[in-house]
Amino acid sequence: MSGEKHHIVPYRLYFVVLIALLALTFASVWITSIELRDYTVAAALLFAIVKSYLVLNYFMHLKYDKPYIKIMVGFVFAIFLVMIVITFLDYLYR
Amino acid sequence: MEHAHHVEHPDMYDAESSKVGMWLFIFTELLLFGALFVIYAVYRYMNPDAFHLAGEELNRVIGTVNTVILLISSMTIAMATTALQKGQRNVAIGLVSITFVIGLVFLVNKYFEWGVKFSHGIWPGSEHMMNEMSHGEILFFGLYFVMTGLHALHIIIGMAIMVFAVRGLVRGKVHADRPSLLDNCGLYWHLVDLIWIFLFPLFYLIH
């Protein structure tokens, strides 16, 4: 059941992740305020994806979880991606 | 003879099952919000100019402030699990309480933000919205109220779970060998944070 010892994440690591998340937030505010035209959406989403990667891995401990949990999470995001792609294929080619 | 008298229930506690169960629940939440994000993407694709115009109406400063405090709250509740594993119960209680207060601040900000919208006559089905806004702007604000409203509801639920987690900590039912309630409370709160990470740029930043 609780055979293996749980990995204790040090406070300092959480703090470092927070600083990174805040930096990414301000960077995304800055990059969307300059005129990038069509790339604004892509830039904002890119920053959001990096931020969610940090939250999932460190705050939600996926980095320290067993592989099958990581695979499950990856699978759900893959389903979501497929849902978006199929929806837009439908709208673009109907 | 085991049947003759009531035996003490065996402890069925299993940290890993609890975690997997929580993740399965989180998946359903991701797909709920995922569907809303797809709706947003399609309507944005169909009404780019209206979404651009309507987005200018939102206050970037209040959106950024709420993002910052929500990220900080995610750190504090993550630290609470570390505190519990180290056996620092009071630190864990303090950290969860701080997280709760930050959630409250988030809601107060949301209250003022929505209040400004209401005072401008913008709410779902309002006269101003129906008569003076284009179809695309109505869609933008409809999605804005539904998605941030649903997110705020999740903040409230997350805060309610924190109350139970603190109660468990105080009563000694949640401890280093039995941390699932606190861990799952944290997972839920991070989910709320995760959703906001996407809501914030899509509504406040993209013009």
Image (cartoon, coloured by chain):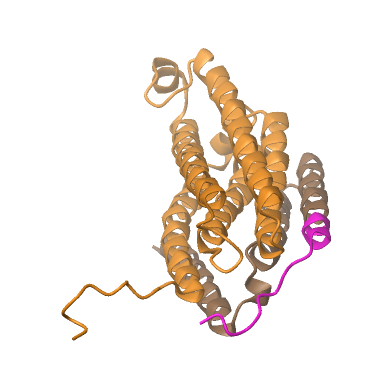
Chain colours: A brown, B orange
Is residue A38 among the parts visible in the rendering? Answer: no
Residue pictured at 63% horizontal, 35% vertical: B101
User: x, y (%) of residue B78?
Assistant: 67, 56
User: x, y (%) of residue B144?
Assistant: 50, 36
Which quadrant of the structure image shows residue A32? top right
Quadrant, the N terminus of chain B: bottom left
Residue pictured at 27% horizontal, 75% vertical: B7
Left or right: B110 in relation to A83: right
Q: Is residue B131 above or below residue A17?
A: above
User: x, y (%) of residue B188?
Assistant: 52, 55
Q: Is residue B144 above or below residue A94?
A: above
User: x, y (%) of residue B89?
Assistant: 66, 53
A66 vs B148, nearest the viewer: A66
B82 vs A64, nearest the viewer: B82
B95 vs B55, nearest the viewer: B95
Quadrant, the C terminus of chain B: top right
Residue pictured at 61% horizontal, 34% vertical: B106
Can you name the residue that lies furthest to the left here?
Answer: B4
Please provide the residue range marked out in magenta. Answer: A1-17
Left or right: A55 in relation to A32: left
Which quadrant of the structure image shows residue B100? top right
Tally the numbered discs: 0
B78 vs A82, nearest the viewer: B78
Residue B8, magenta (yes or no): no
Is residue B82 among the parts visible in the rendering? Answer: yes
Left or right: B146 in relation to B49: left
Can you name the residue that lies furthest to the top here?
Answer: B119
